[in-house]
Amino acid sequence: MLNLVSSIRENYQYALDQIASAARKSSLDPEQVRLVVVTKSQPLEVIQAAIEAGVHILGENYPEEAVTKIEALAGQTGVEWHMIGHVQSRKARLVADHFALLHSLDSLKLAKRLDRFAAEAGHVLPVLLQFNVGGEASKAGWEASDESHWDALLPDVSSILDLPNLRVQGLMTMPPLGTDPEDSRRYFQRLRQLRDRFTSQFPQADWHELSMGTSADYPVAVEEGATLVRVGTAIVGGRNYSHPG
Ligand SMILES: *Cc1c(COP(=O)(O)O)cnc(C)c1O
């Protein structure tokens, strides 16, 4: 356990340092970037060690797995849980009830369900809208790889902004896995350009968050304006992929 805590602490600190130097490289404020440590498929001991190592924000992909962990660690203070994976409609209530931020809102239908459950729970759920800027058929998110189709996104975005129990705070993407961190740069730039488009189209809304970058490419994401990076394996090590989905 002690070894686990000290290795996670070292990796976490290293990632924070990388974030700070990437931000400075682009004349951005490192304080504006939050590091989400992704603990999907990791056992409770790893999460406990991460918290002990100073991690504040935990990212999970599967609502049921996450809620089991959240309940087991309910005594922990100062920890914030983010949902970063695709959410099936029937899991919407779990997400509305248990998370501080949903990064991966990817349809109007899901938005309406989340809005209803958040209303029933008596709170407002902060969300980011997920866009597929790389054009891969397998990726979740509104298709946004081709700029000429961006206008087609506006009706859904407008409807989501009208939902009283969701609070949109920005955008998220998961680009194609490249062989080099630089391969991701153009996708991060595209997400930022899409954010700029929404900012001019819907200036009354809040678009300040850009959730982009993983272990593979988070320094590049920060250089391109990420305010949330989602880093798993580089901090907490490899996962066992036997999750049922
Ligand atoms: C798993 C995952 C991450 C973290 O990936 P690592 O390669 O472990 O850093 C980030 N974002 C999403 C959406 C993920 O599913």
Image (cartoon, helix red, strand yellow):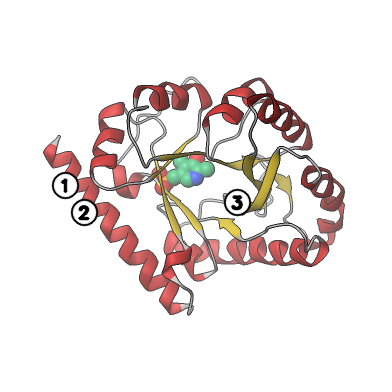
Left or right of 84 in this view: 155: right
Residue 194 in the image, given as x and y percentages of width and height = 72, 62
Q: Nearer the viewer, mark 1 or mark 3?
A: 1
Give neighbour class at mark 3: few <14, some 14-19, many 20+ (Cα, 10 Å): many
- Circle 2 Cα neighbour tier, 10 Å, few/some/many (<14 / 14–19 / ≥20): some
44 or 177: which is nearer to us? 44
Which residue shows up at 46% across the image and 24% down it?
67
Residue that carries the numbered disc 1 in the rendered image:
6
- Please state the horizontal and vertical placement of residue 68, each as a whole percent of the image: 42, 21
Q: Classify residue 158 as left or right of residue 208.
A: right
Q: Let me know if residue 139 appears in the view.
A: no
Q: Earlier in the sequence, mark 3 or mark 2?
A: 2
| Residue in view at x 26 percent, y 53 percent | 11
**Residue 10, which numbered label?**
2
At which x and y percent is residue 153? 82, 51
| Discs 1, 2 touching: Cβ within 8 Å | yes
Asked whether the viewer can see residue 145, the reply is yes
Between the C-alphas of marks 1 and 3, the distance is 31 Å
Mark 1 surroundings: few (<14), some (14-19) or many (≥20) residues within 10 A: some
Q: Which of the labelled discs sits on residue 159, or is there none?
A: none
Q: Which mark is residue 173?
A: 3
For image coordinates 77% across by 60% down, the residue present is 204
